[in-house]
Amino acid sequence: MPNFTITHQMVLDNVGVVQTLESTDVLIGQNVTIAGCSSTINGTRKVFQIPIYLFTGVSAEGDYLFNTEVVIKNQILFQVTAANLTRNEVSPVGTLTWTVPTSCTWITVAMLTEFLGISGATANDTAFMTTSVNASNAYCFKRRSQAGYHDSMTVVPDAAVQSGTVLMAASLYRERGSIDSFNSFQDMTISAPVASMGRINSLLGIKRAQVA
């Protein structure tokens, strides 16, 4: 349950905005709890936007308006029914608490075992398979979130994402005890691993071209 420091606050057109001292991984649609700010802002709020510009109000059509000449980092925007409050410093500071969602469960150890074609030989192998699967689930969900996707943490988006997550888990498992690549008993240089990051990124649908 990460806590972040709130340095500034404002309310305009029934929209609240707070600025945190640190950057956060909070995503649109998630809930945060605000304390130590104005009584009209404090409470549990659903995040509607993560803006980077100064909020200036709501248009007649209901769109959020911003001054693109004023950059303000680490902001979180939410709906709140309250009187306008000019942007001001929170003194001494407020706190923003983010309840981290439950762990991602896109793939399982059974899926990794199917890909590897062999079960864990020892209890340690099986334990490391679980570690690799958990790490891959967390990594792939985070990378998809950073790329702008809003996925369920319990239902994998599609077969491609599932395959990419399995490949990532296999890469982590096969690199066990190695410095920077798959382990090998060969003295000569081995060929590039099949589960490359390029293939994994492609399956996850990230690092796509932003223009046609």
Image (spheres, rainbow, N blue to C red):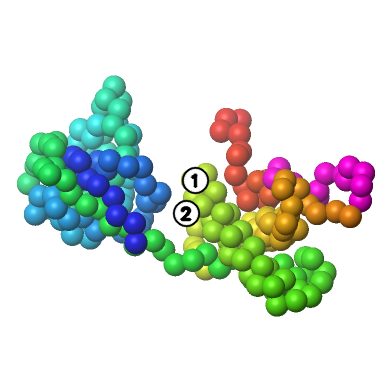
Badge 1: how crowded within 10 Å, few (<14), some, or many (20+)? Answer: some
**Horizontal and vertical percent for residue 90?**
13, 42
Where is 183 relative to 87, above or below?
below
Residue 166's x, y, as percent? 69, 61
Magenta stretch contains residue 192: yes
Q: Residue 102 falls in which quadrant of the image?
A: bottom left
Which element type, helix, strand or loop, lies under badge 2?
A: loop
**Marks 1 and 2, how far apart at CA:** 9 Å
Q: Which residue is mark 1?
A: 146
Q: Which residues are magenta?
A: 186-198
Q: Which residue is mark 2?
A: 150
| Residue 186 spot, x, y in % from top left | 91, 51
Label 1, secondary structure: give it.
helix
Mark 1 vs mark 2, foreground winner is: 1
Amino acid found under the numbered disc labelled 1: Gln
Q: Which residue is found at the position 56% from the left and 68% from the top?
A: 105
Q: Is residue 97 above or below residue 147?
A: below
Is residue 118 visible in the rendered image? The answer is: yes
Q: Is residue 150 left or right of residue 133?
A: left
